[in-house]
Amino acid sequence: MYTIIEMLESIRDFRELGGDVLVLIAWTIFFMWVLIIERFIFFRTGLKARIREAFEAWEARPDRKSWEAARIREAMISRVSQSANTGLPMIKTLVALCPLLGLLGTVTGMIEVFDVMAVTGTGNARSMASGVSKATIPTMAGMVGALSGVLFATILERYATREVQLLEDELTMDH
């Protein structure tokens, strides 16, 4: 129990060092990771089922050579592709938002530094340290969130593309 309290105090101290923008960055990263985890779970369960359903529906068709059959095949592939790519644009948006929020933290921290300099002069380094930490910690947090998000967004996008391509290859037009 004591270690949990120490962890919570460390998180609180880190948040105070980074300022209010750090909370916004943390929520952004949290939502991004919720979406990333949801996509991984969907790829392991729901996407496999949708691909199997599309393949079985295609194999059950007696006609696979006509123009109409080709359009039905395209529609099946399109539905699977749409379900595979759902959420990926939002993940990419949150990834792009992380460094921008870090930059916002940098700007607000530097404003605090300039405020201290205007009031106390340039000689008070201790007063300026709080503003400098509020300028650097959100930048670091935004970049860490963006880097982790870019990696997993790329993995998810490649997996979705590969699964749709495999389905497209499996749904043959011959009979």
Image (cartoon, helix red, strand yellow):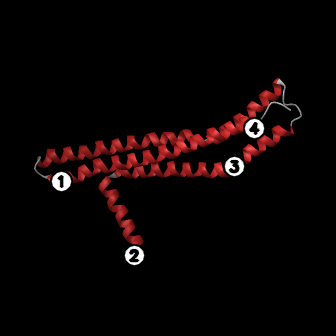
Identify the secondary structure beneath mark 2: helix
Looking at numbered disc 1 in the image, what kind of residue is underneath it?
A: Ser
User: Residues under labels 1 and 3: Cα distance?
Assistant: 54 Å
**Number of the label disc, if any, that sits on residue 46:** 3
Using the image as rendered, state which of residue 42 and residue 169 is in the foreground: 169
Q: Nearer the viewer, mark 3 or mark 4?
A: 4
Question: In the rendered picture of this protein, how many numbered marks are placed on residues?
Answer: 4
Q: Quadrant of residue 114?
A: top left
Residue 69 percent coordinates (x, y): 82, 29
User: Residues under labels 1 and 2: Cα distance?
Assistant: 32 Å
Residue position for label 4: 170
Residue 167 percent coordinates (x, y): 72, 38
**Closer to the N terminus: mark 3 or mark 4?**
3
Q: Residue at x 66, y 37 (%)?
A: 82
Q: Is residue 6 above or below residue 66?
A: below
Disc 1 crowd, CA 10 A, few/some/many (<14, 14-19, 20+): some
Q: Nearer the viewer, mark 4 or mark 2?
A: 4
Looking at numbered disc 2 in the image, what kind of residue is underneath it?
A: Tyr
Residue position for label 1: 127
> In the figure, is residue 87 to the left or right of 45?
left
Identify the secondary structure beneath mark 1: helix
**Closer to the N terminus: mark 4 or mark 2?**
2
Q: Residue at x 79, y 31 (%)?
A: 72
Disc 4 crowd, CA 10 A, few/some/many (<14, 14-19, 20+): few
Residue 171 percent coordinates (x, y): 77, 36
User: Residues under labels 1 and 4: Cα distance?
Assistant: 66 Å
Residue 68 percent coordinates (x, y): 82, 26
User: Residues under labels 3 and 4: Cα distance?
Assistant: 18 Å
Identify the secondary structure beneath mark 4: helix
Callout 1 touching callout 4 (CB < 8 Å): no
Which residue is outermost to the top? 67
**Number of the label disc, if any, that sits on residue 2:** 2
